[in-house]
Image (cartoon, rainbow, N blue to C red):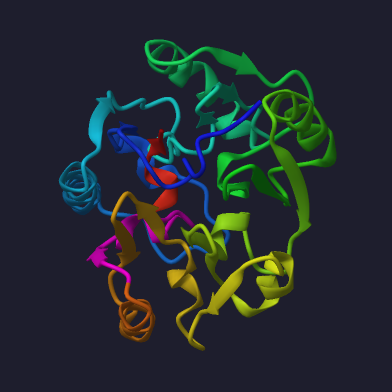
Amino acid sequence: MSHDPFPAYRFSRALLREPAASVVCGLRAVDRGDPSLELFHLEHAAYRAILENAGVETHLLPALSDWPDSVFIEDPAMVLPEGAILFRMAAPSRAGEPDTVREALEAFVPVTPLDNGHVDGGDILVTGPKIFAGLSKRTDREGLDAMGAIVSGWGYELVGVDMPEGLLHLKTGCALLDEETILAVEPLKETFSDFRVLTLPEGEEAAANAIRVNDIVLLAAGYPRTEELLNRWGYNVRTTKVSQAQLLDGGLSCLSIRF
């Protein structure tokens, strides 16, 4: 199957999920305090506005109090031009989330459920016909085998990545910038040997979870050396605060399903 030469950062739609009051009970590796619901809503609204300014039509789904982490809507599913894949999630407190996005996705694309193993969308980096997938605490070999069976039928190559210590998801440590370039933390540099890799300045590794959306690169606020690096390479950088999502090990990519 032939592909659009490069669909991986061109988006016209995005699904977002309103933060629920229960977000204060969200998962986190290190407890640095609960997020503020009021501040989370403000940061979420600013993020949505930037996506819309970048030419993306956004669809905000209602809050789900039963699923504290459901604001991180990228994890339960992913969308390629051929259709969506509904994942199976390993974290027990998130296991019901895929079903909550299925109907919204079916309004736009055919949906194929994963039939085995576990995958989180935060572990999946689409670069074009090659898709990188992190083997993490949330994504296992069985899940990748099941996903690989689906995407290979659509003409994609799925490449498993052994995750460095300290990264929750693959996209905690990397982001696609363009057809040839990936932003990545130093331990992931060799993973992307076919690409130009811009490595994060020391101390700003958390800025790796950026997203390219059409003509902009969206970067979390507070990482001036990374912003300078991207500007130097000619990218059109926008920054926005995600301080509350970061308290729950989340970031920019997690907050939307872009397609």
Does residue 180 lie above or below 55 as drawn?
Answer: below
Using residue 1 as the reference point, say whether residue 19 is left or right of it: left
State the quadrant of the N terminus. Answer: top right
Q: Which residue shows up at 68% across the image and 70% down it?
A: 188
Which stretch did the figure color magenta?
235-251
Q: How many marks?
A: 0
Q: Which residue shows up at 63% across the image and 63% down it?
A: 167
Where residue 227 appears, x then y in whole percent? 32, 78
Q: Is 34 in front, or is 211?
A: 211
Where residue 106 appears, x then y in whole percent? 44, 11
Using residue 222 as the reference point, say whether residue 97 is left or right of it: right
Residue 240 included in the magenta stretch of the image: yes
Does residue 107 lie above or below 6 as drawn?
Answer: above
State the quadrant of the C terminus. Answer: top left
Using residue 193 as the reference point, say whether residue 87 is left or right of it: left
Q: Is 68 in front, or is 83?
A: 83
Q: Which residue shows up at 54% across the image and 60% down it?
A: 172
Quadrant assignment, res 215: bottom left
Where residue 207 appears, x then y in whole percent? 43, 71
Q: Is 181 in front, or is 29?
A: 181
Residue 192 included in the magenta stretch of the image: no
Quadrant assignment, res 116: top right
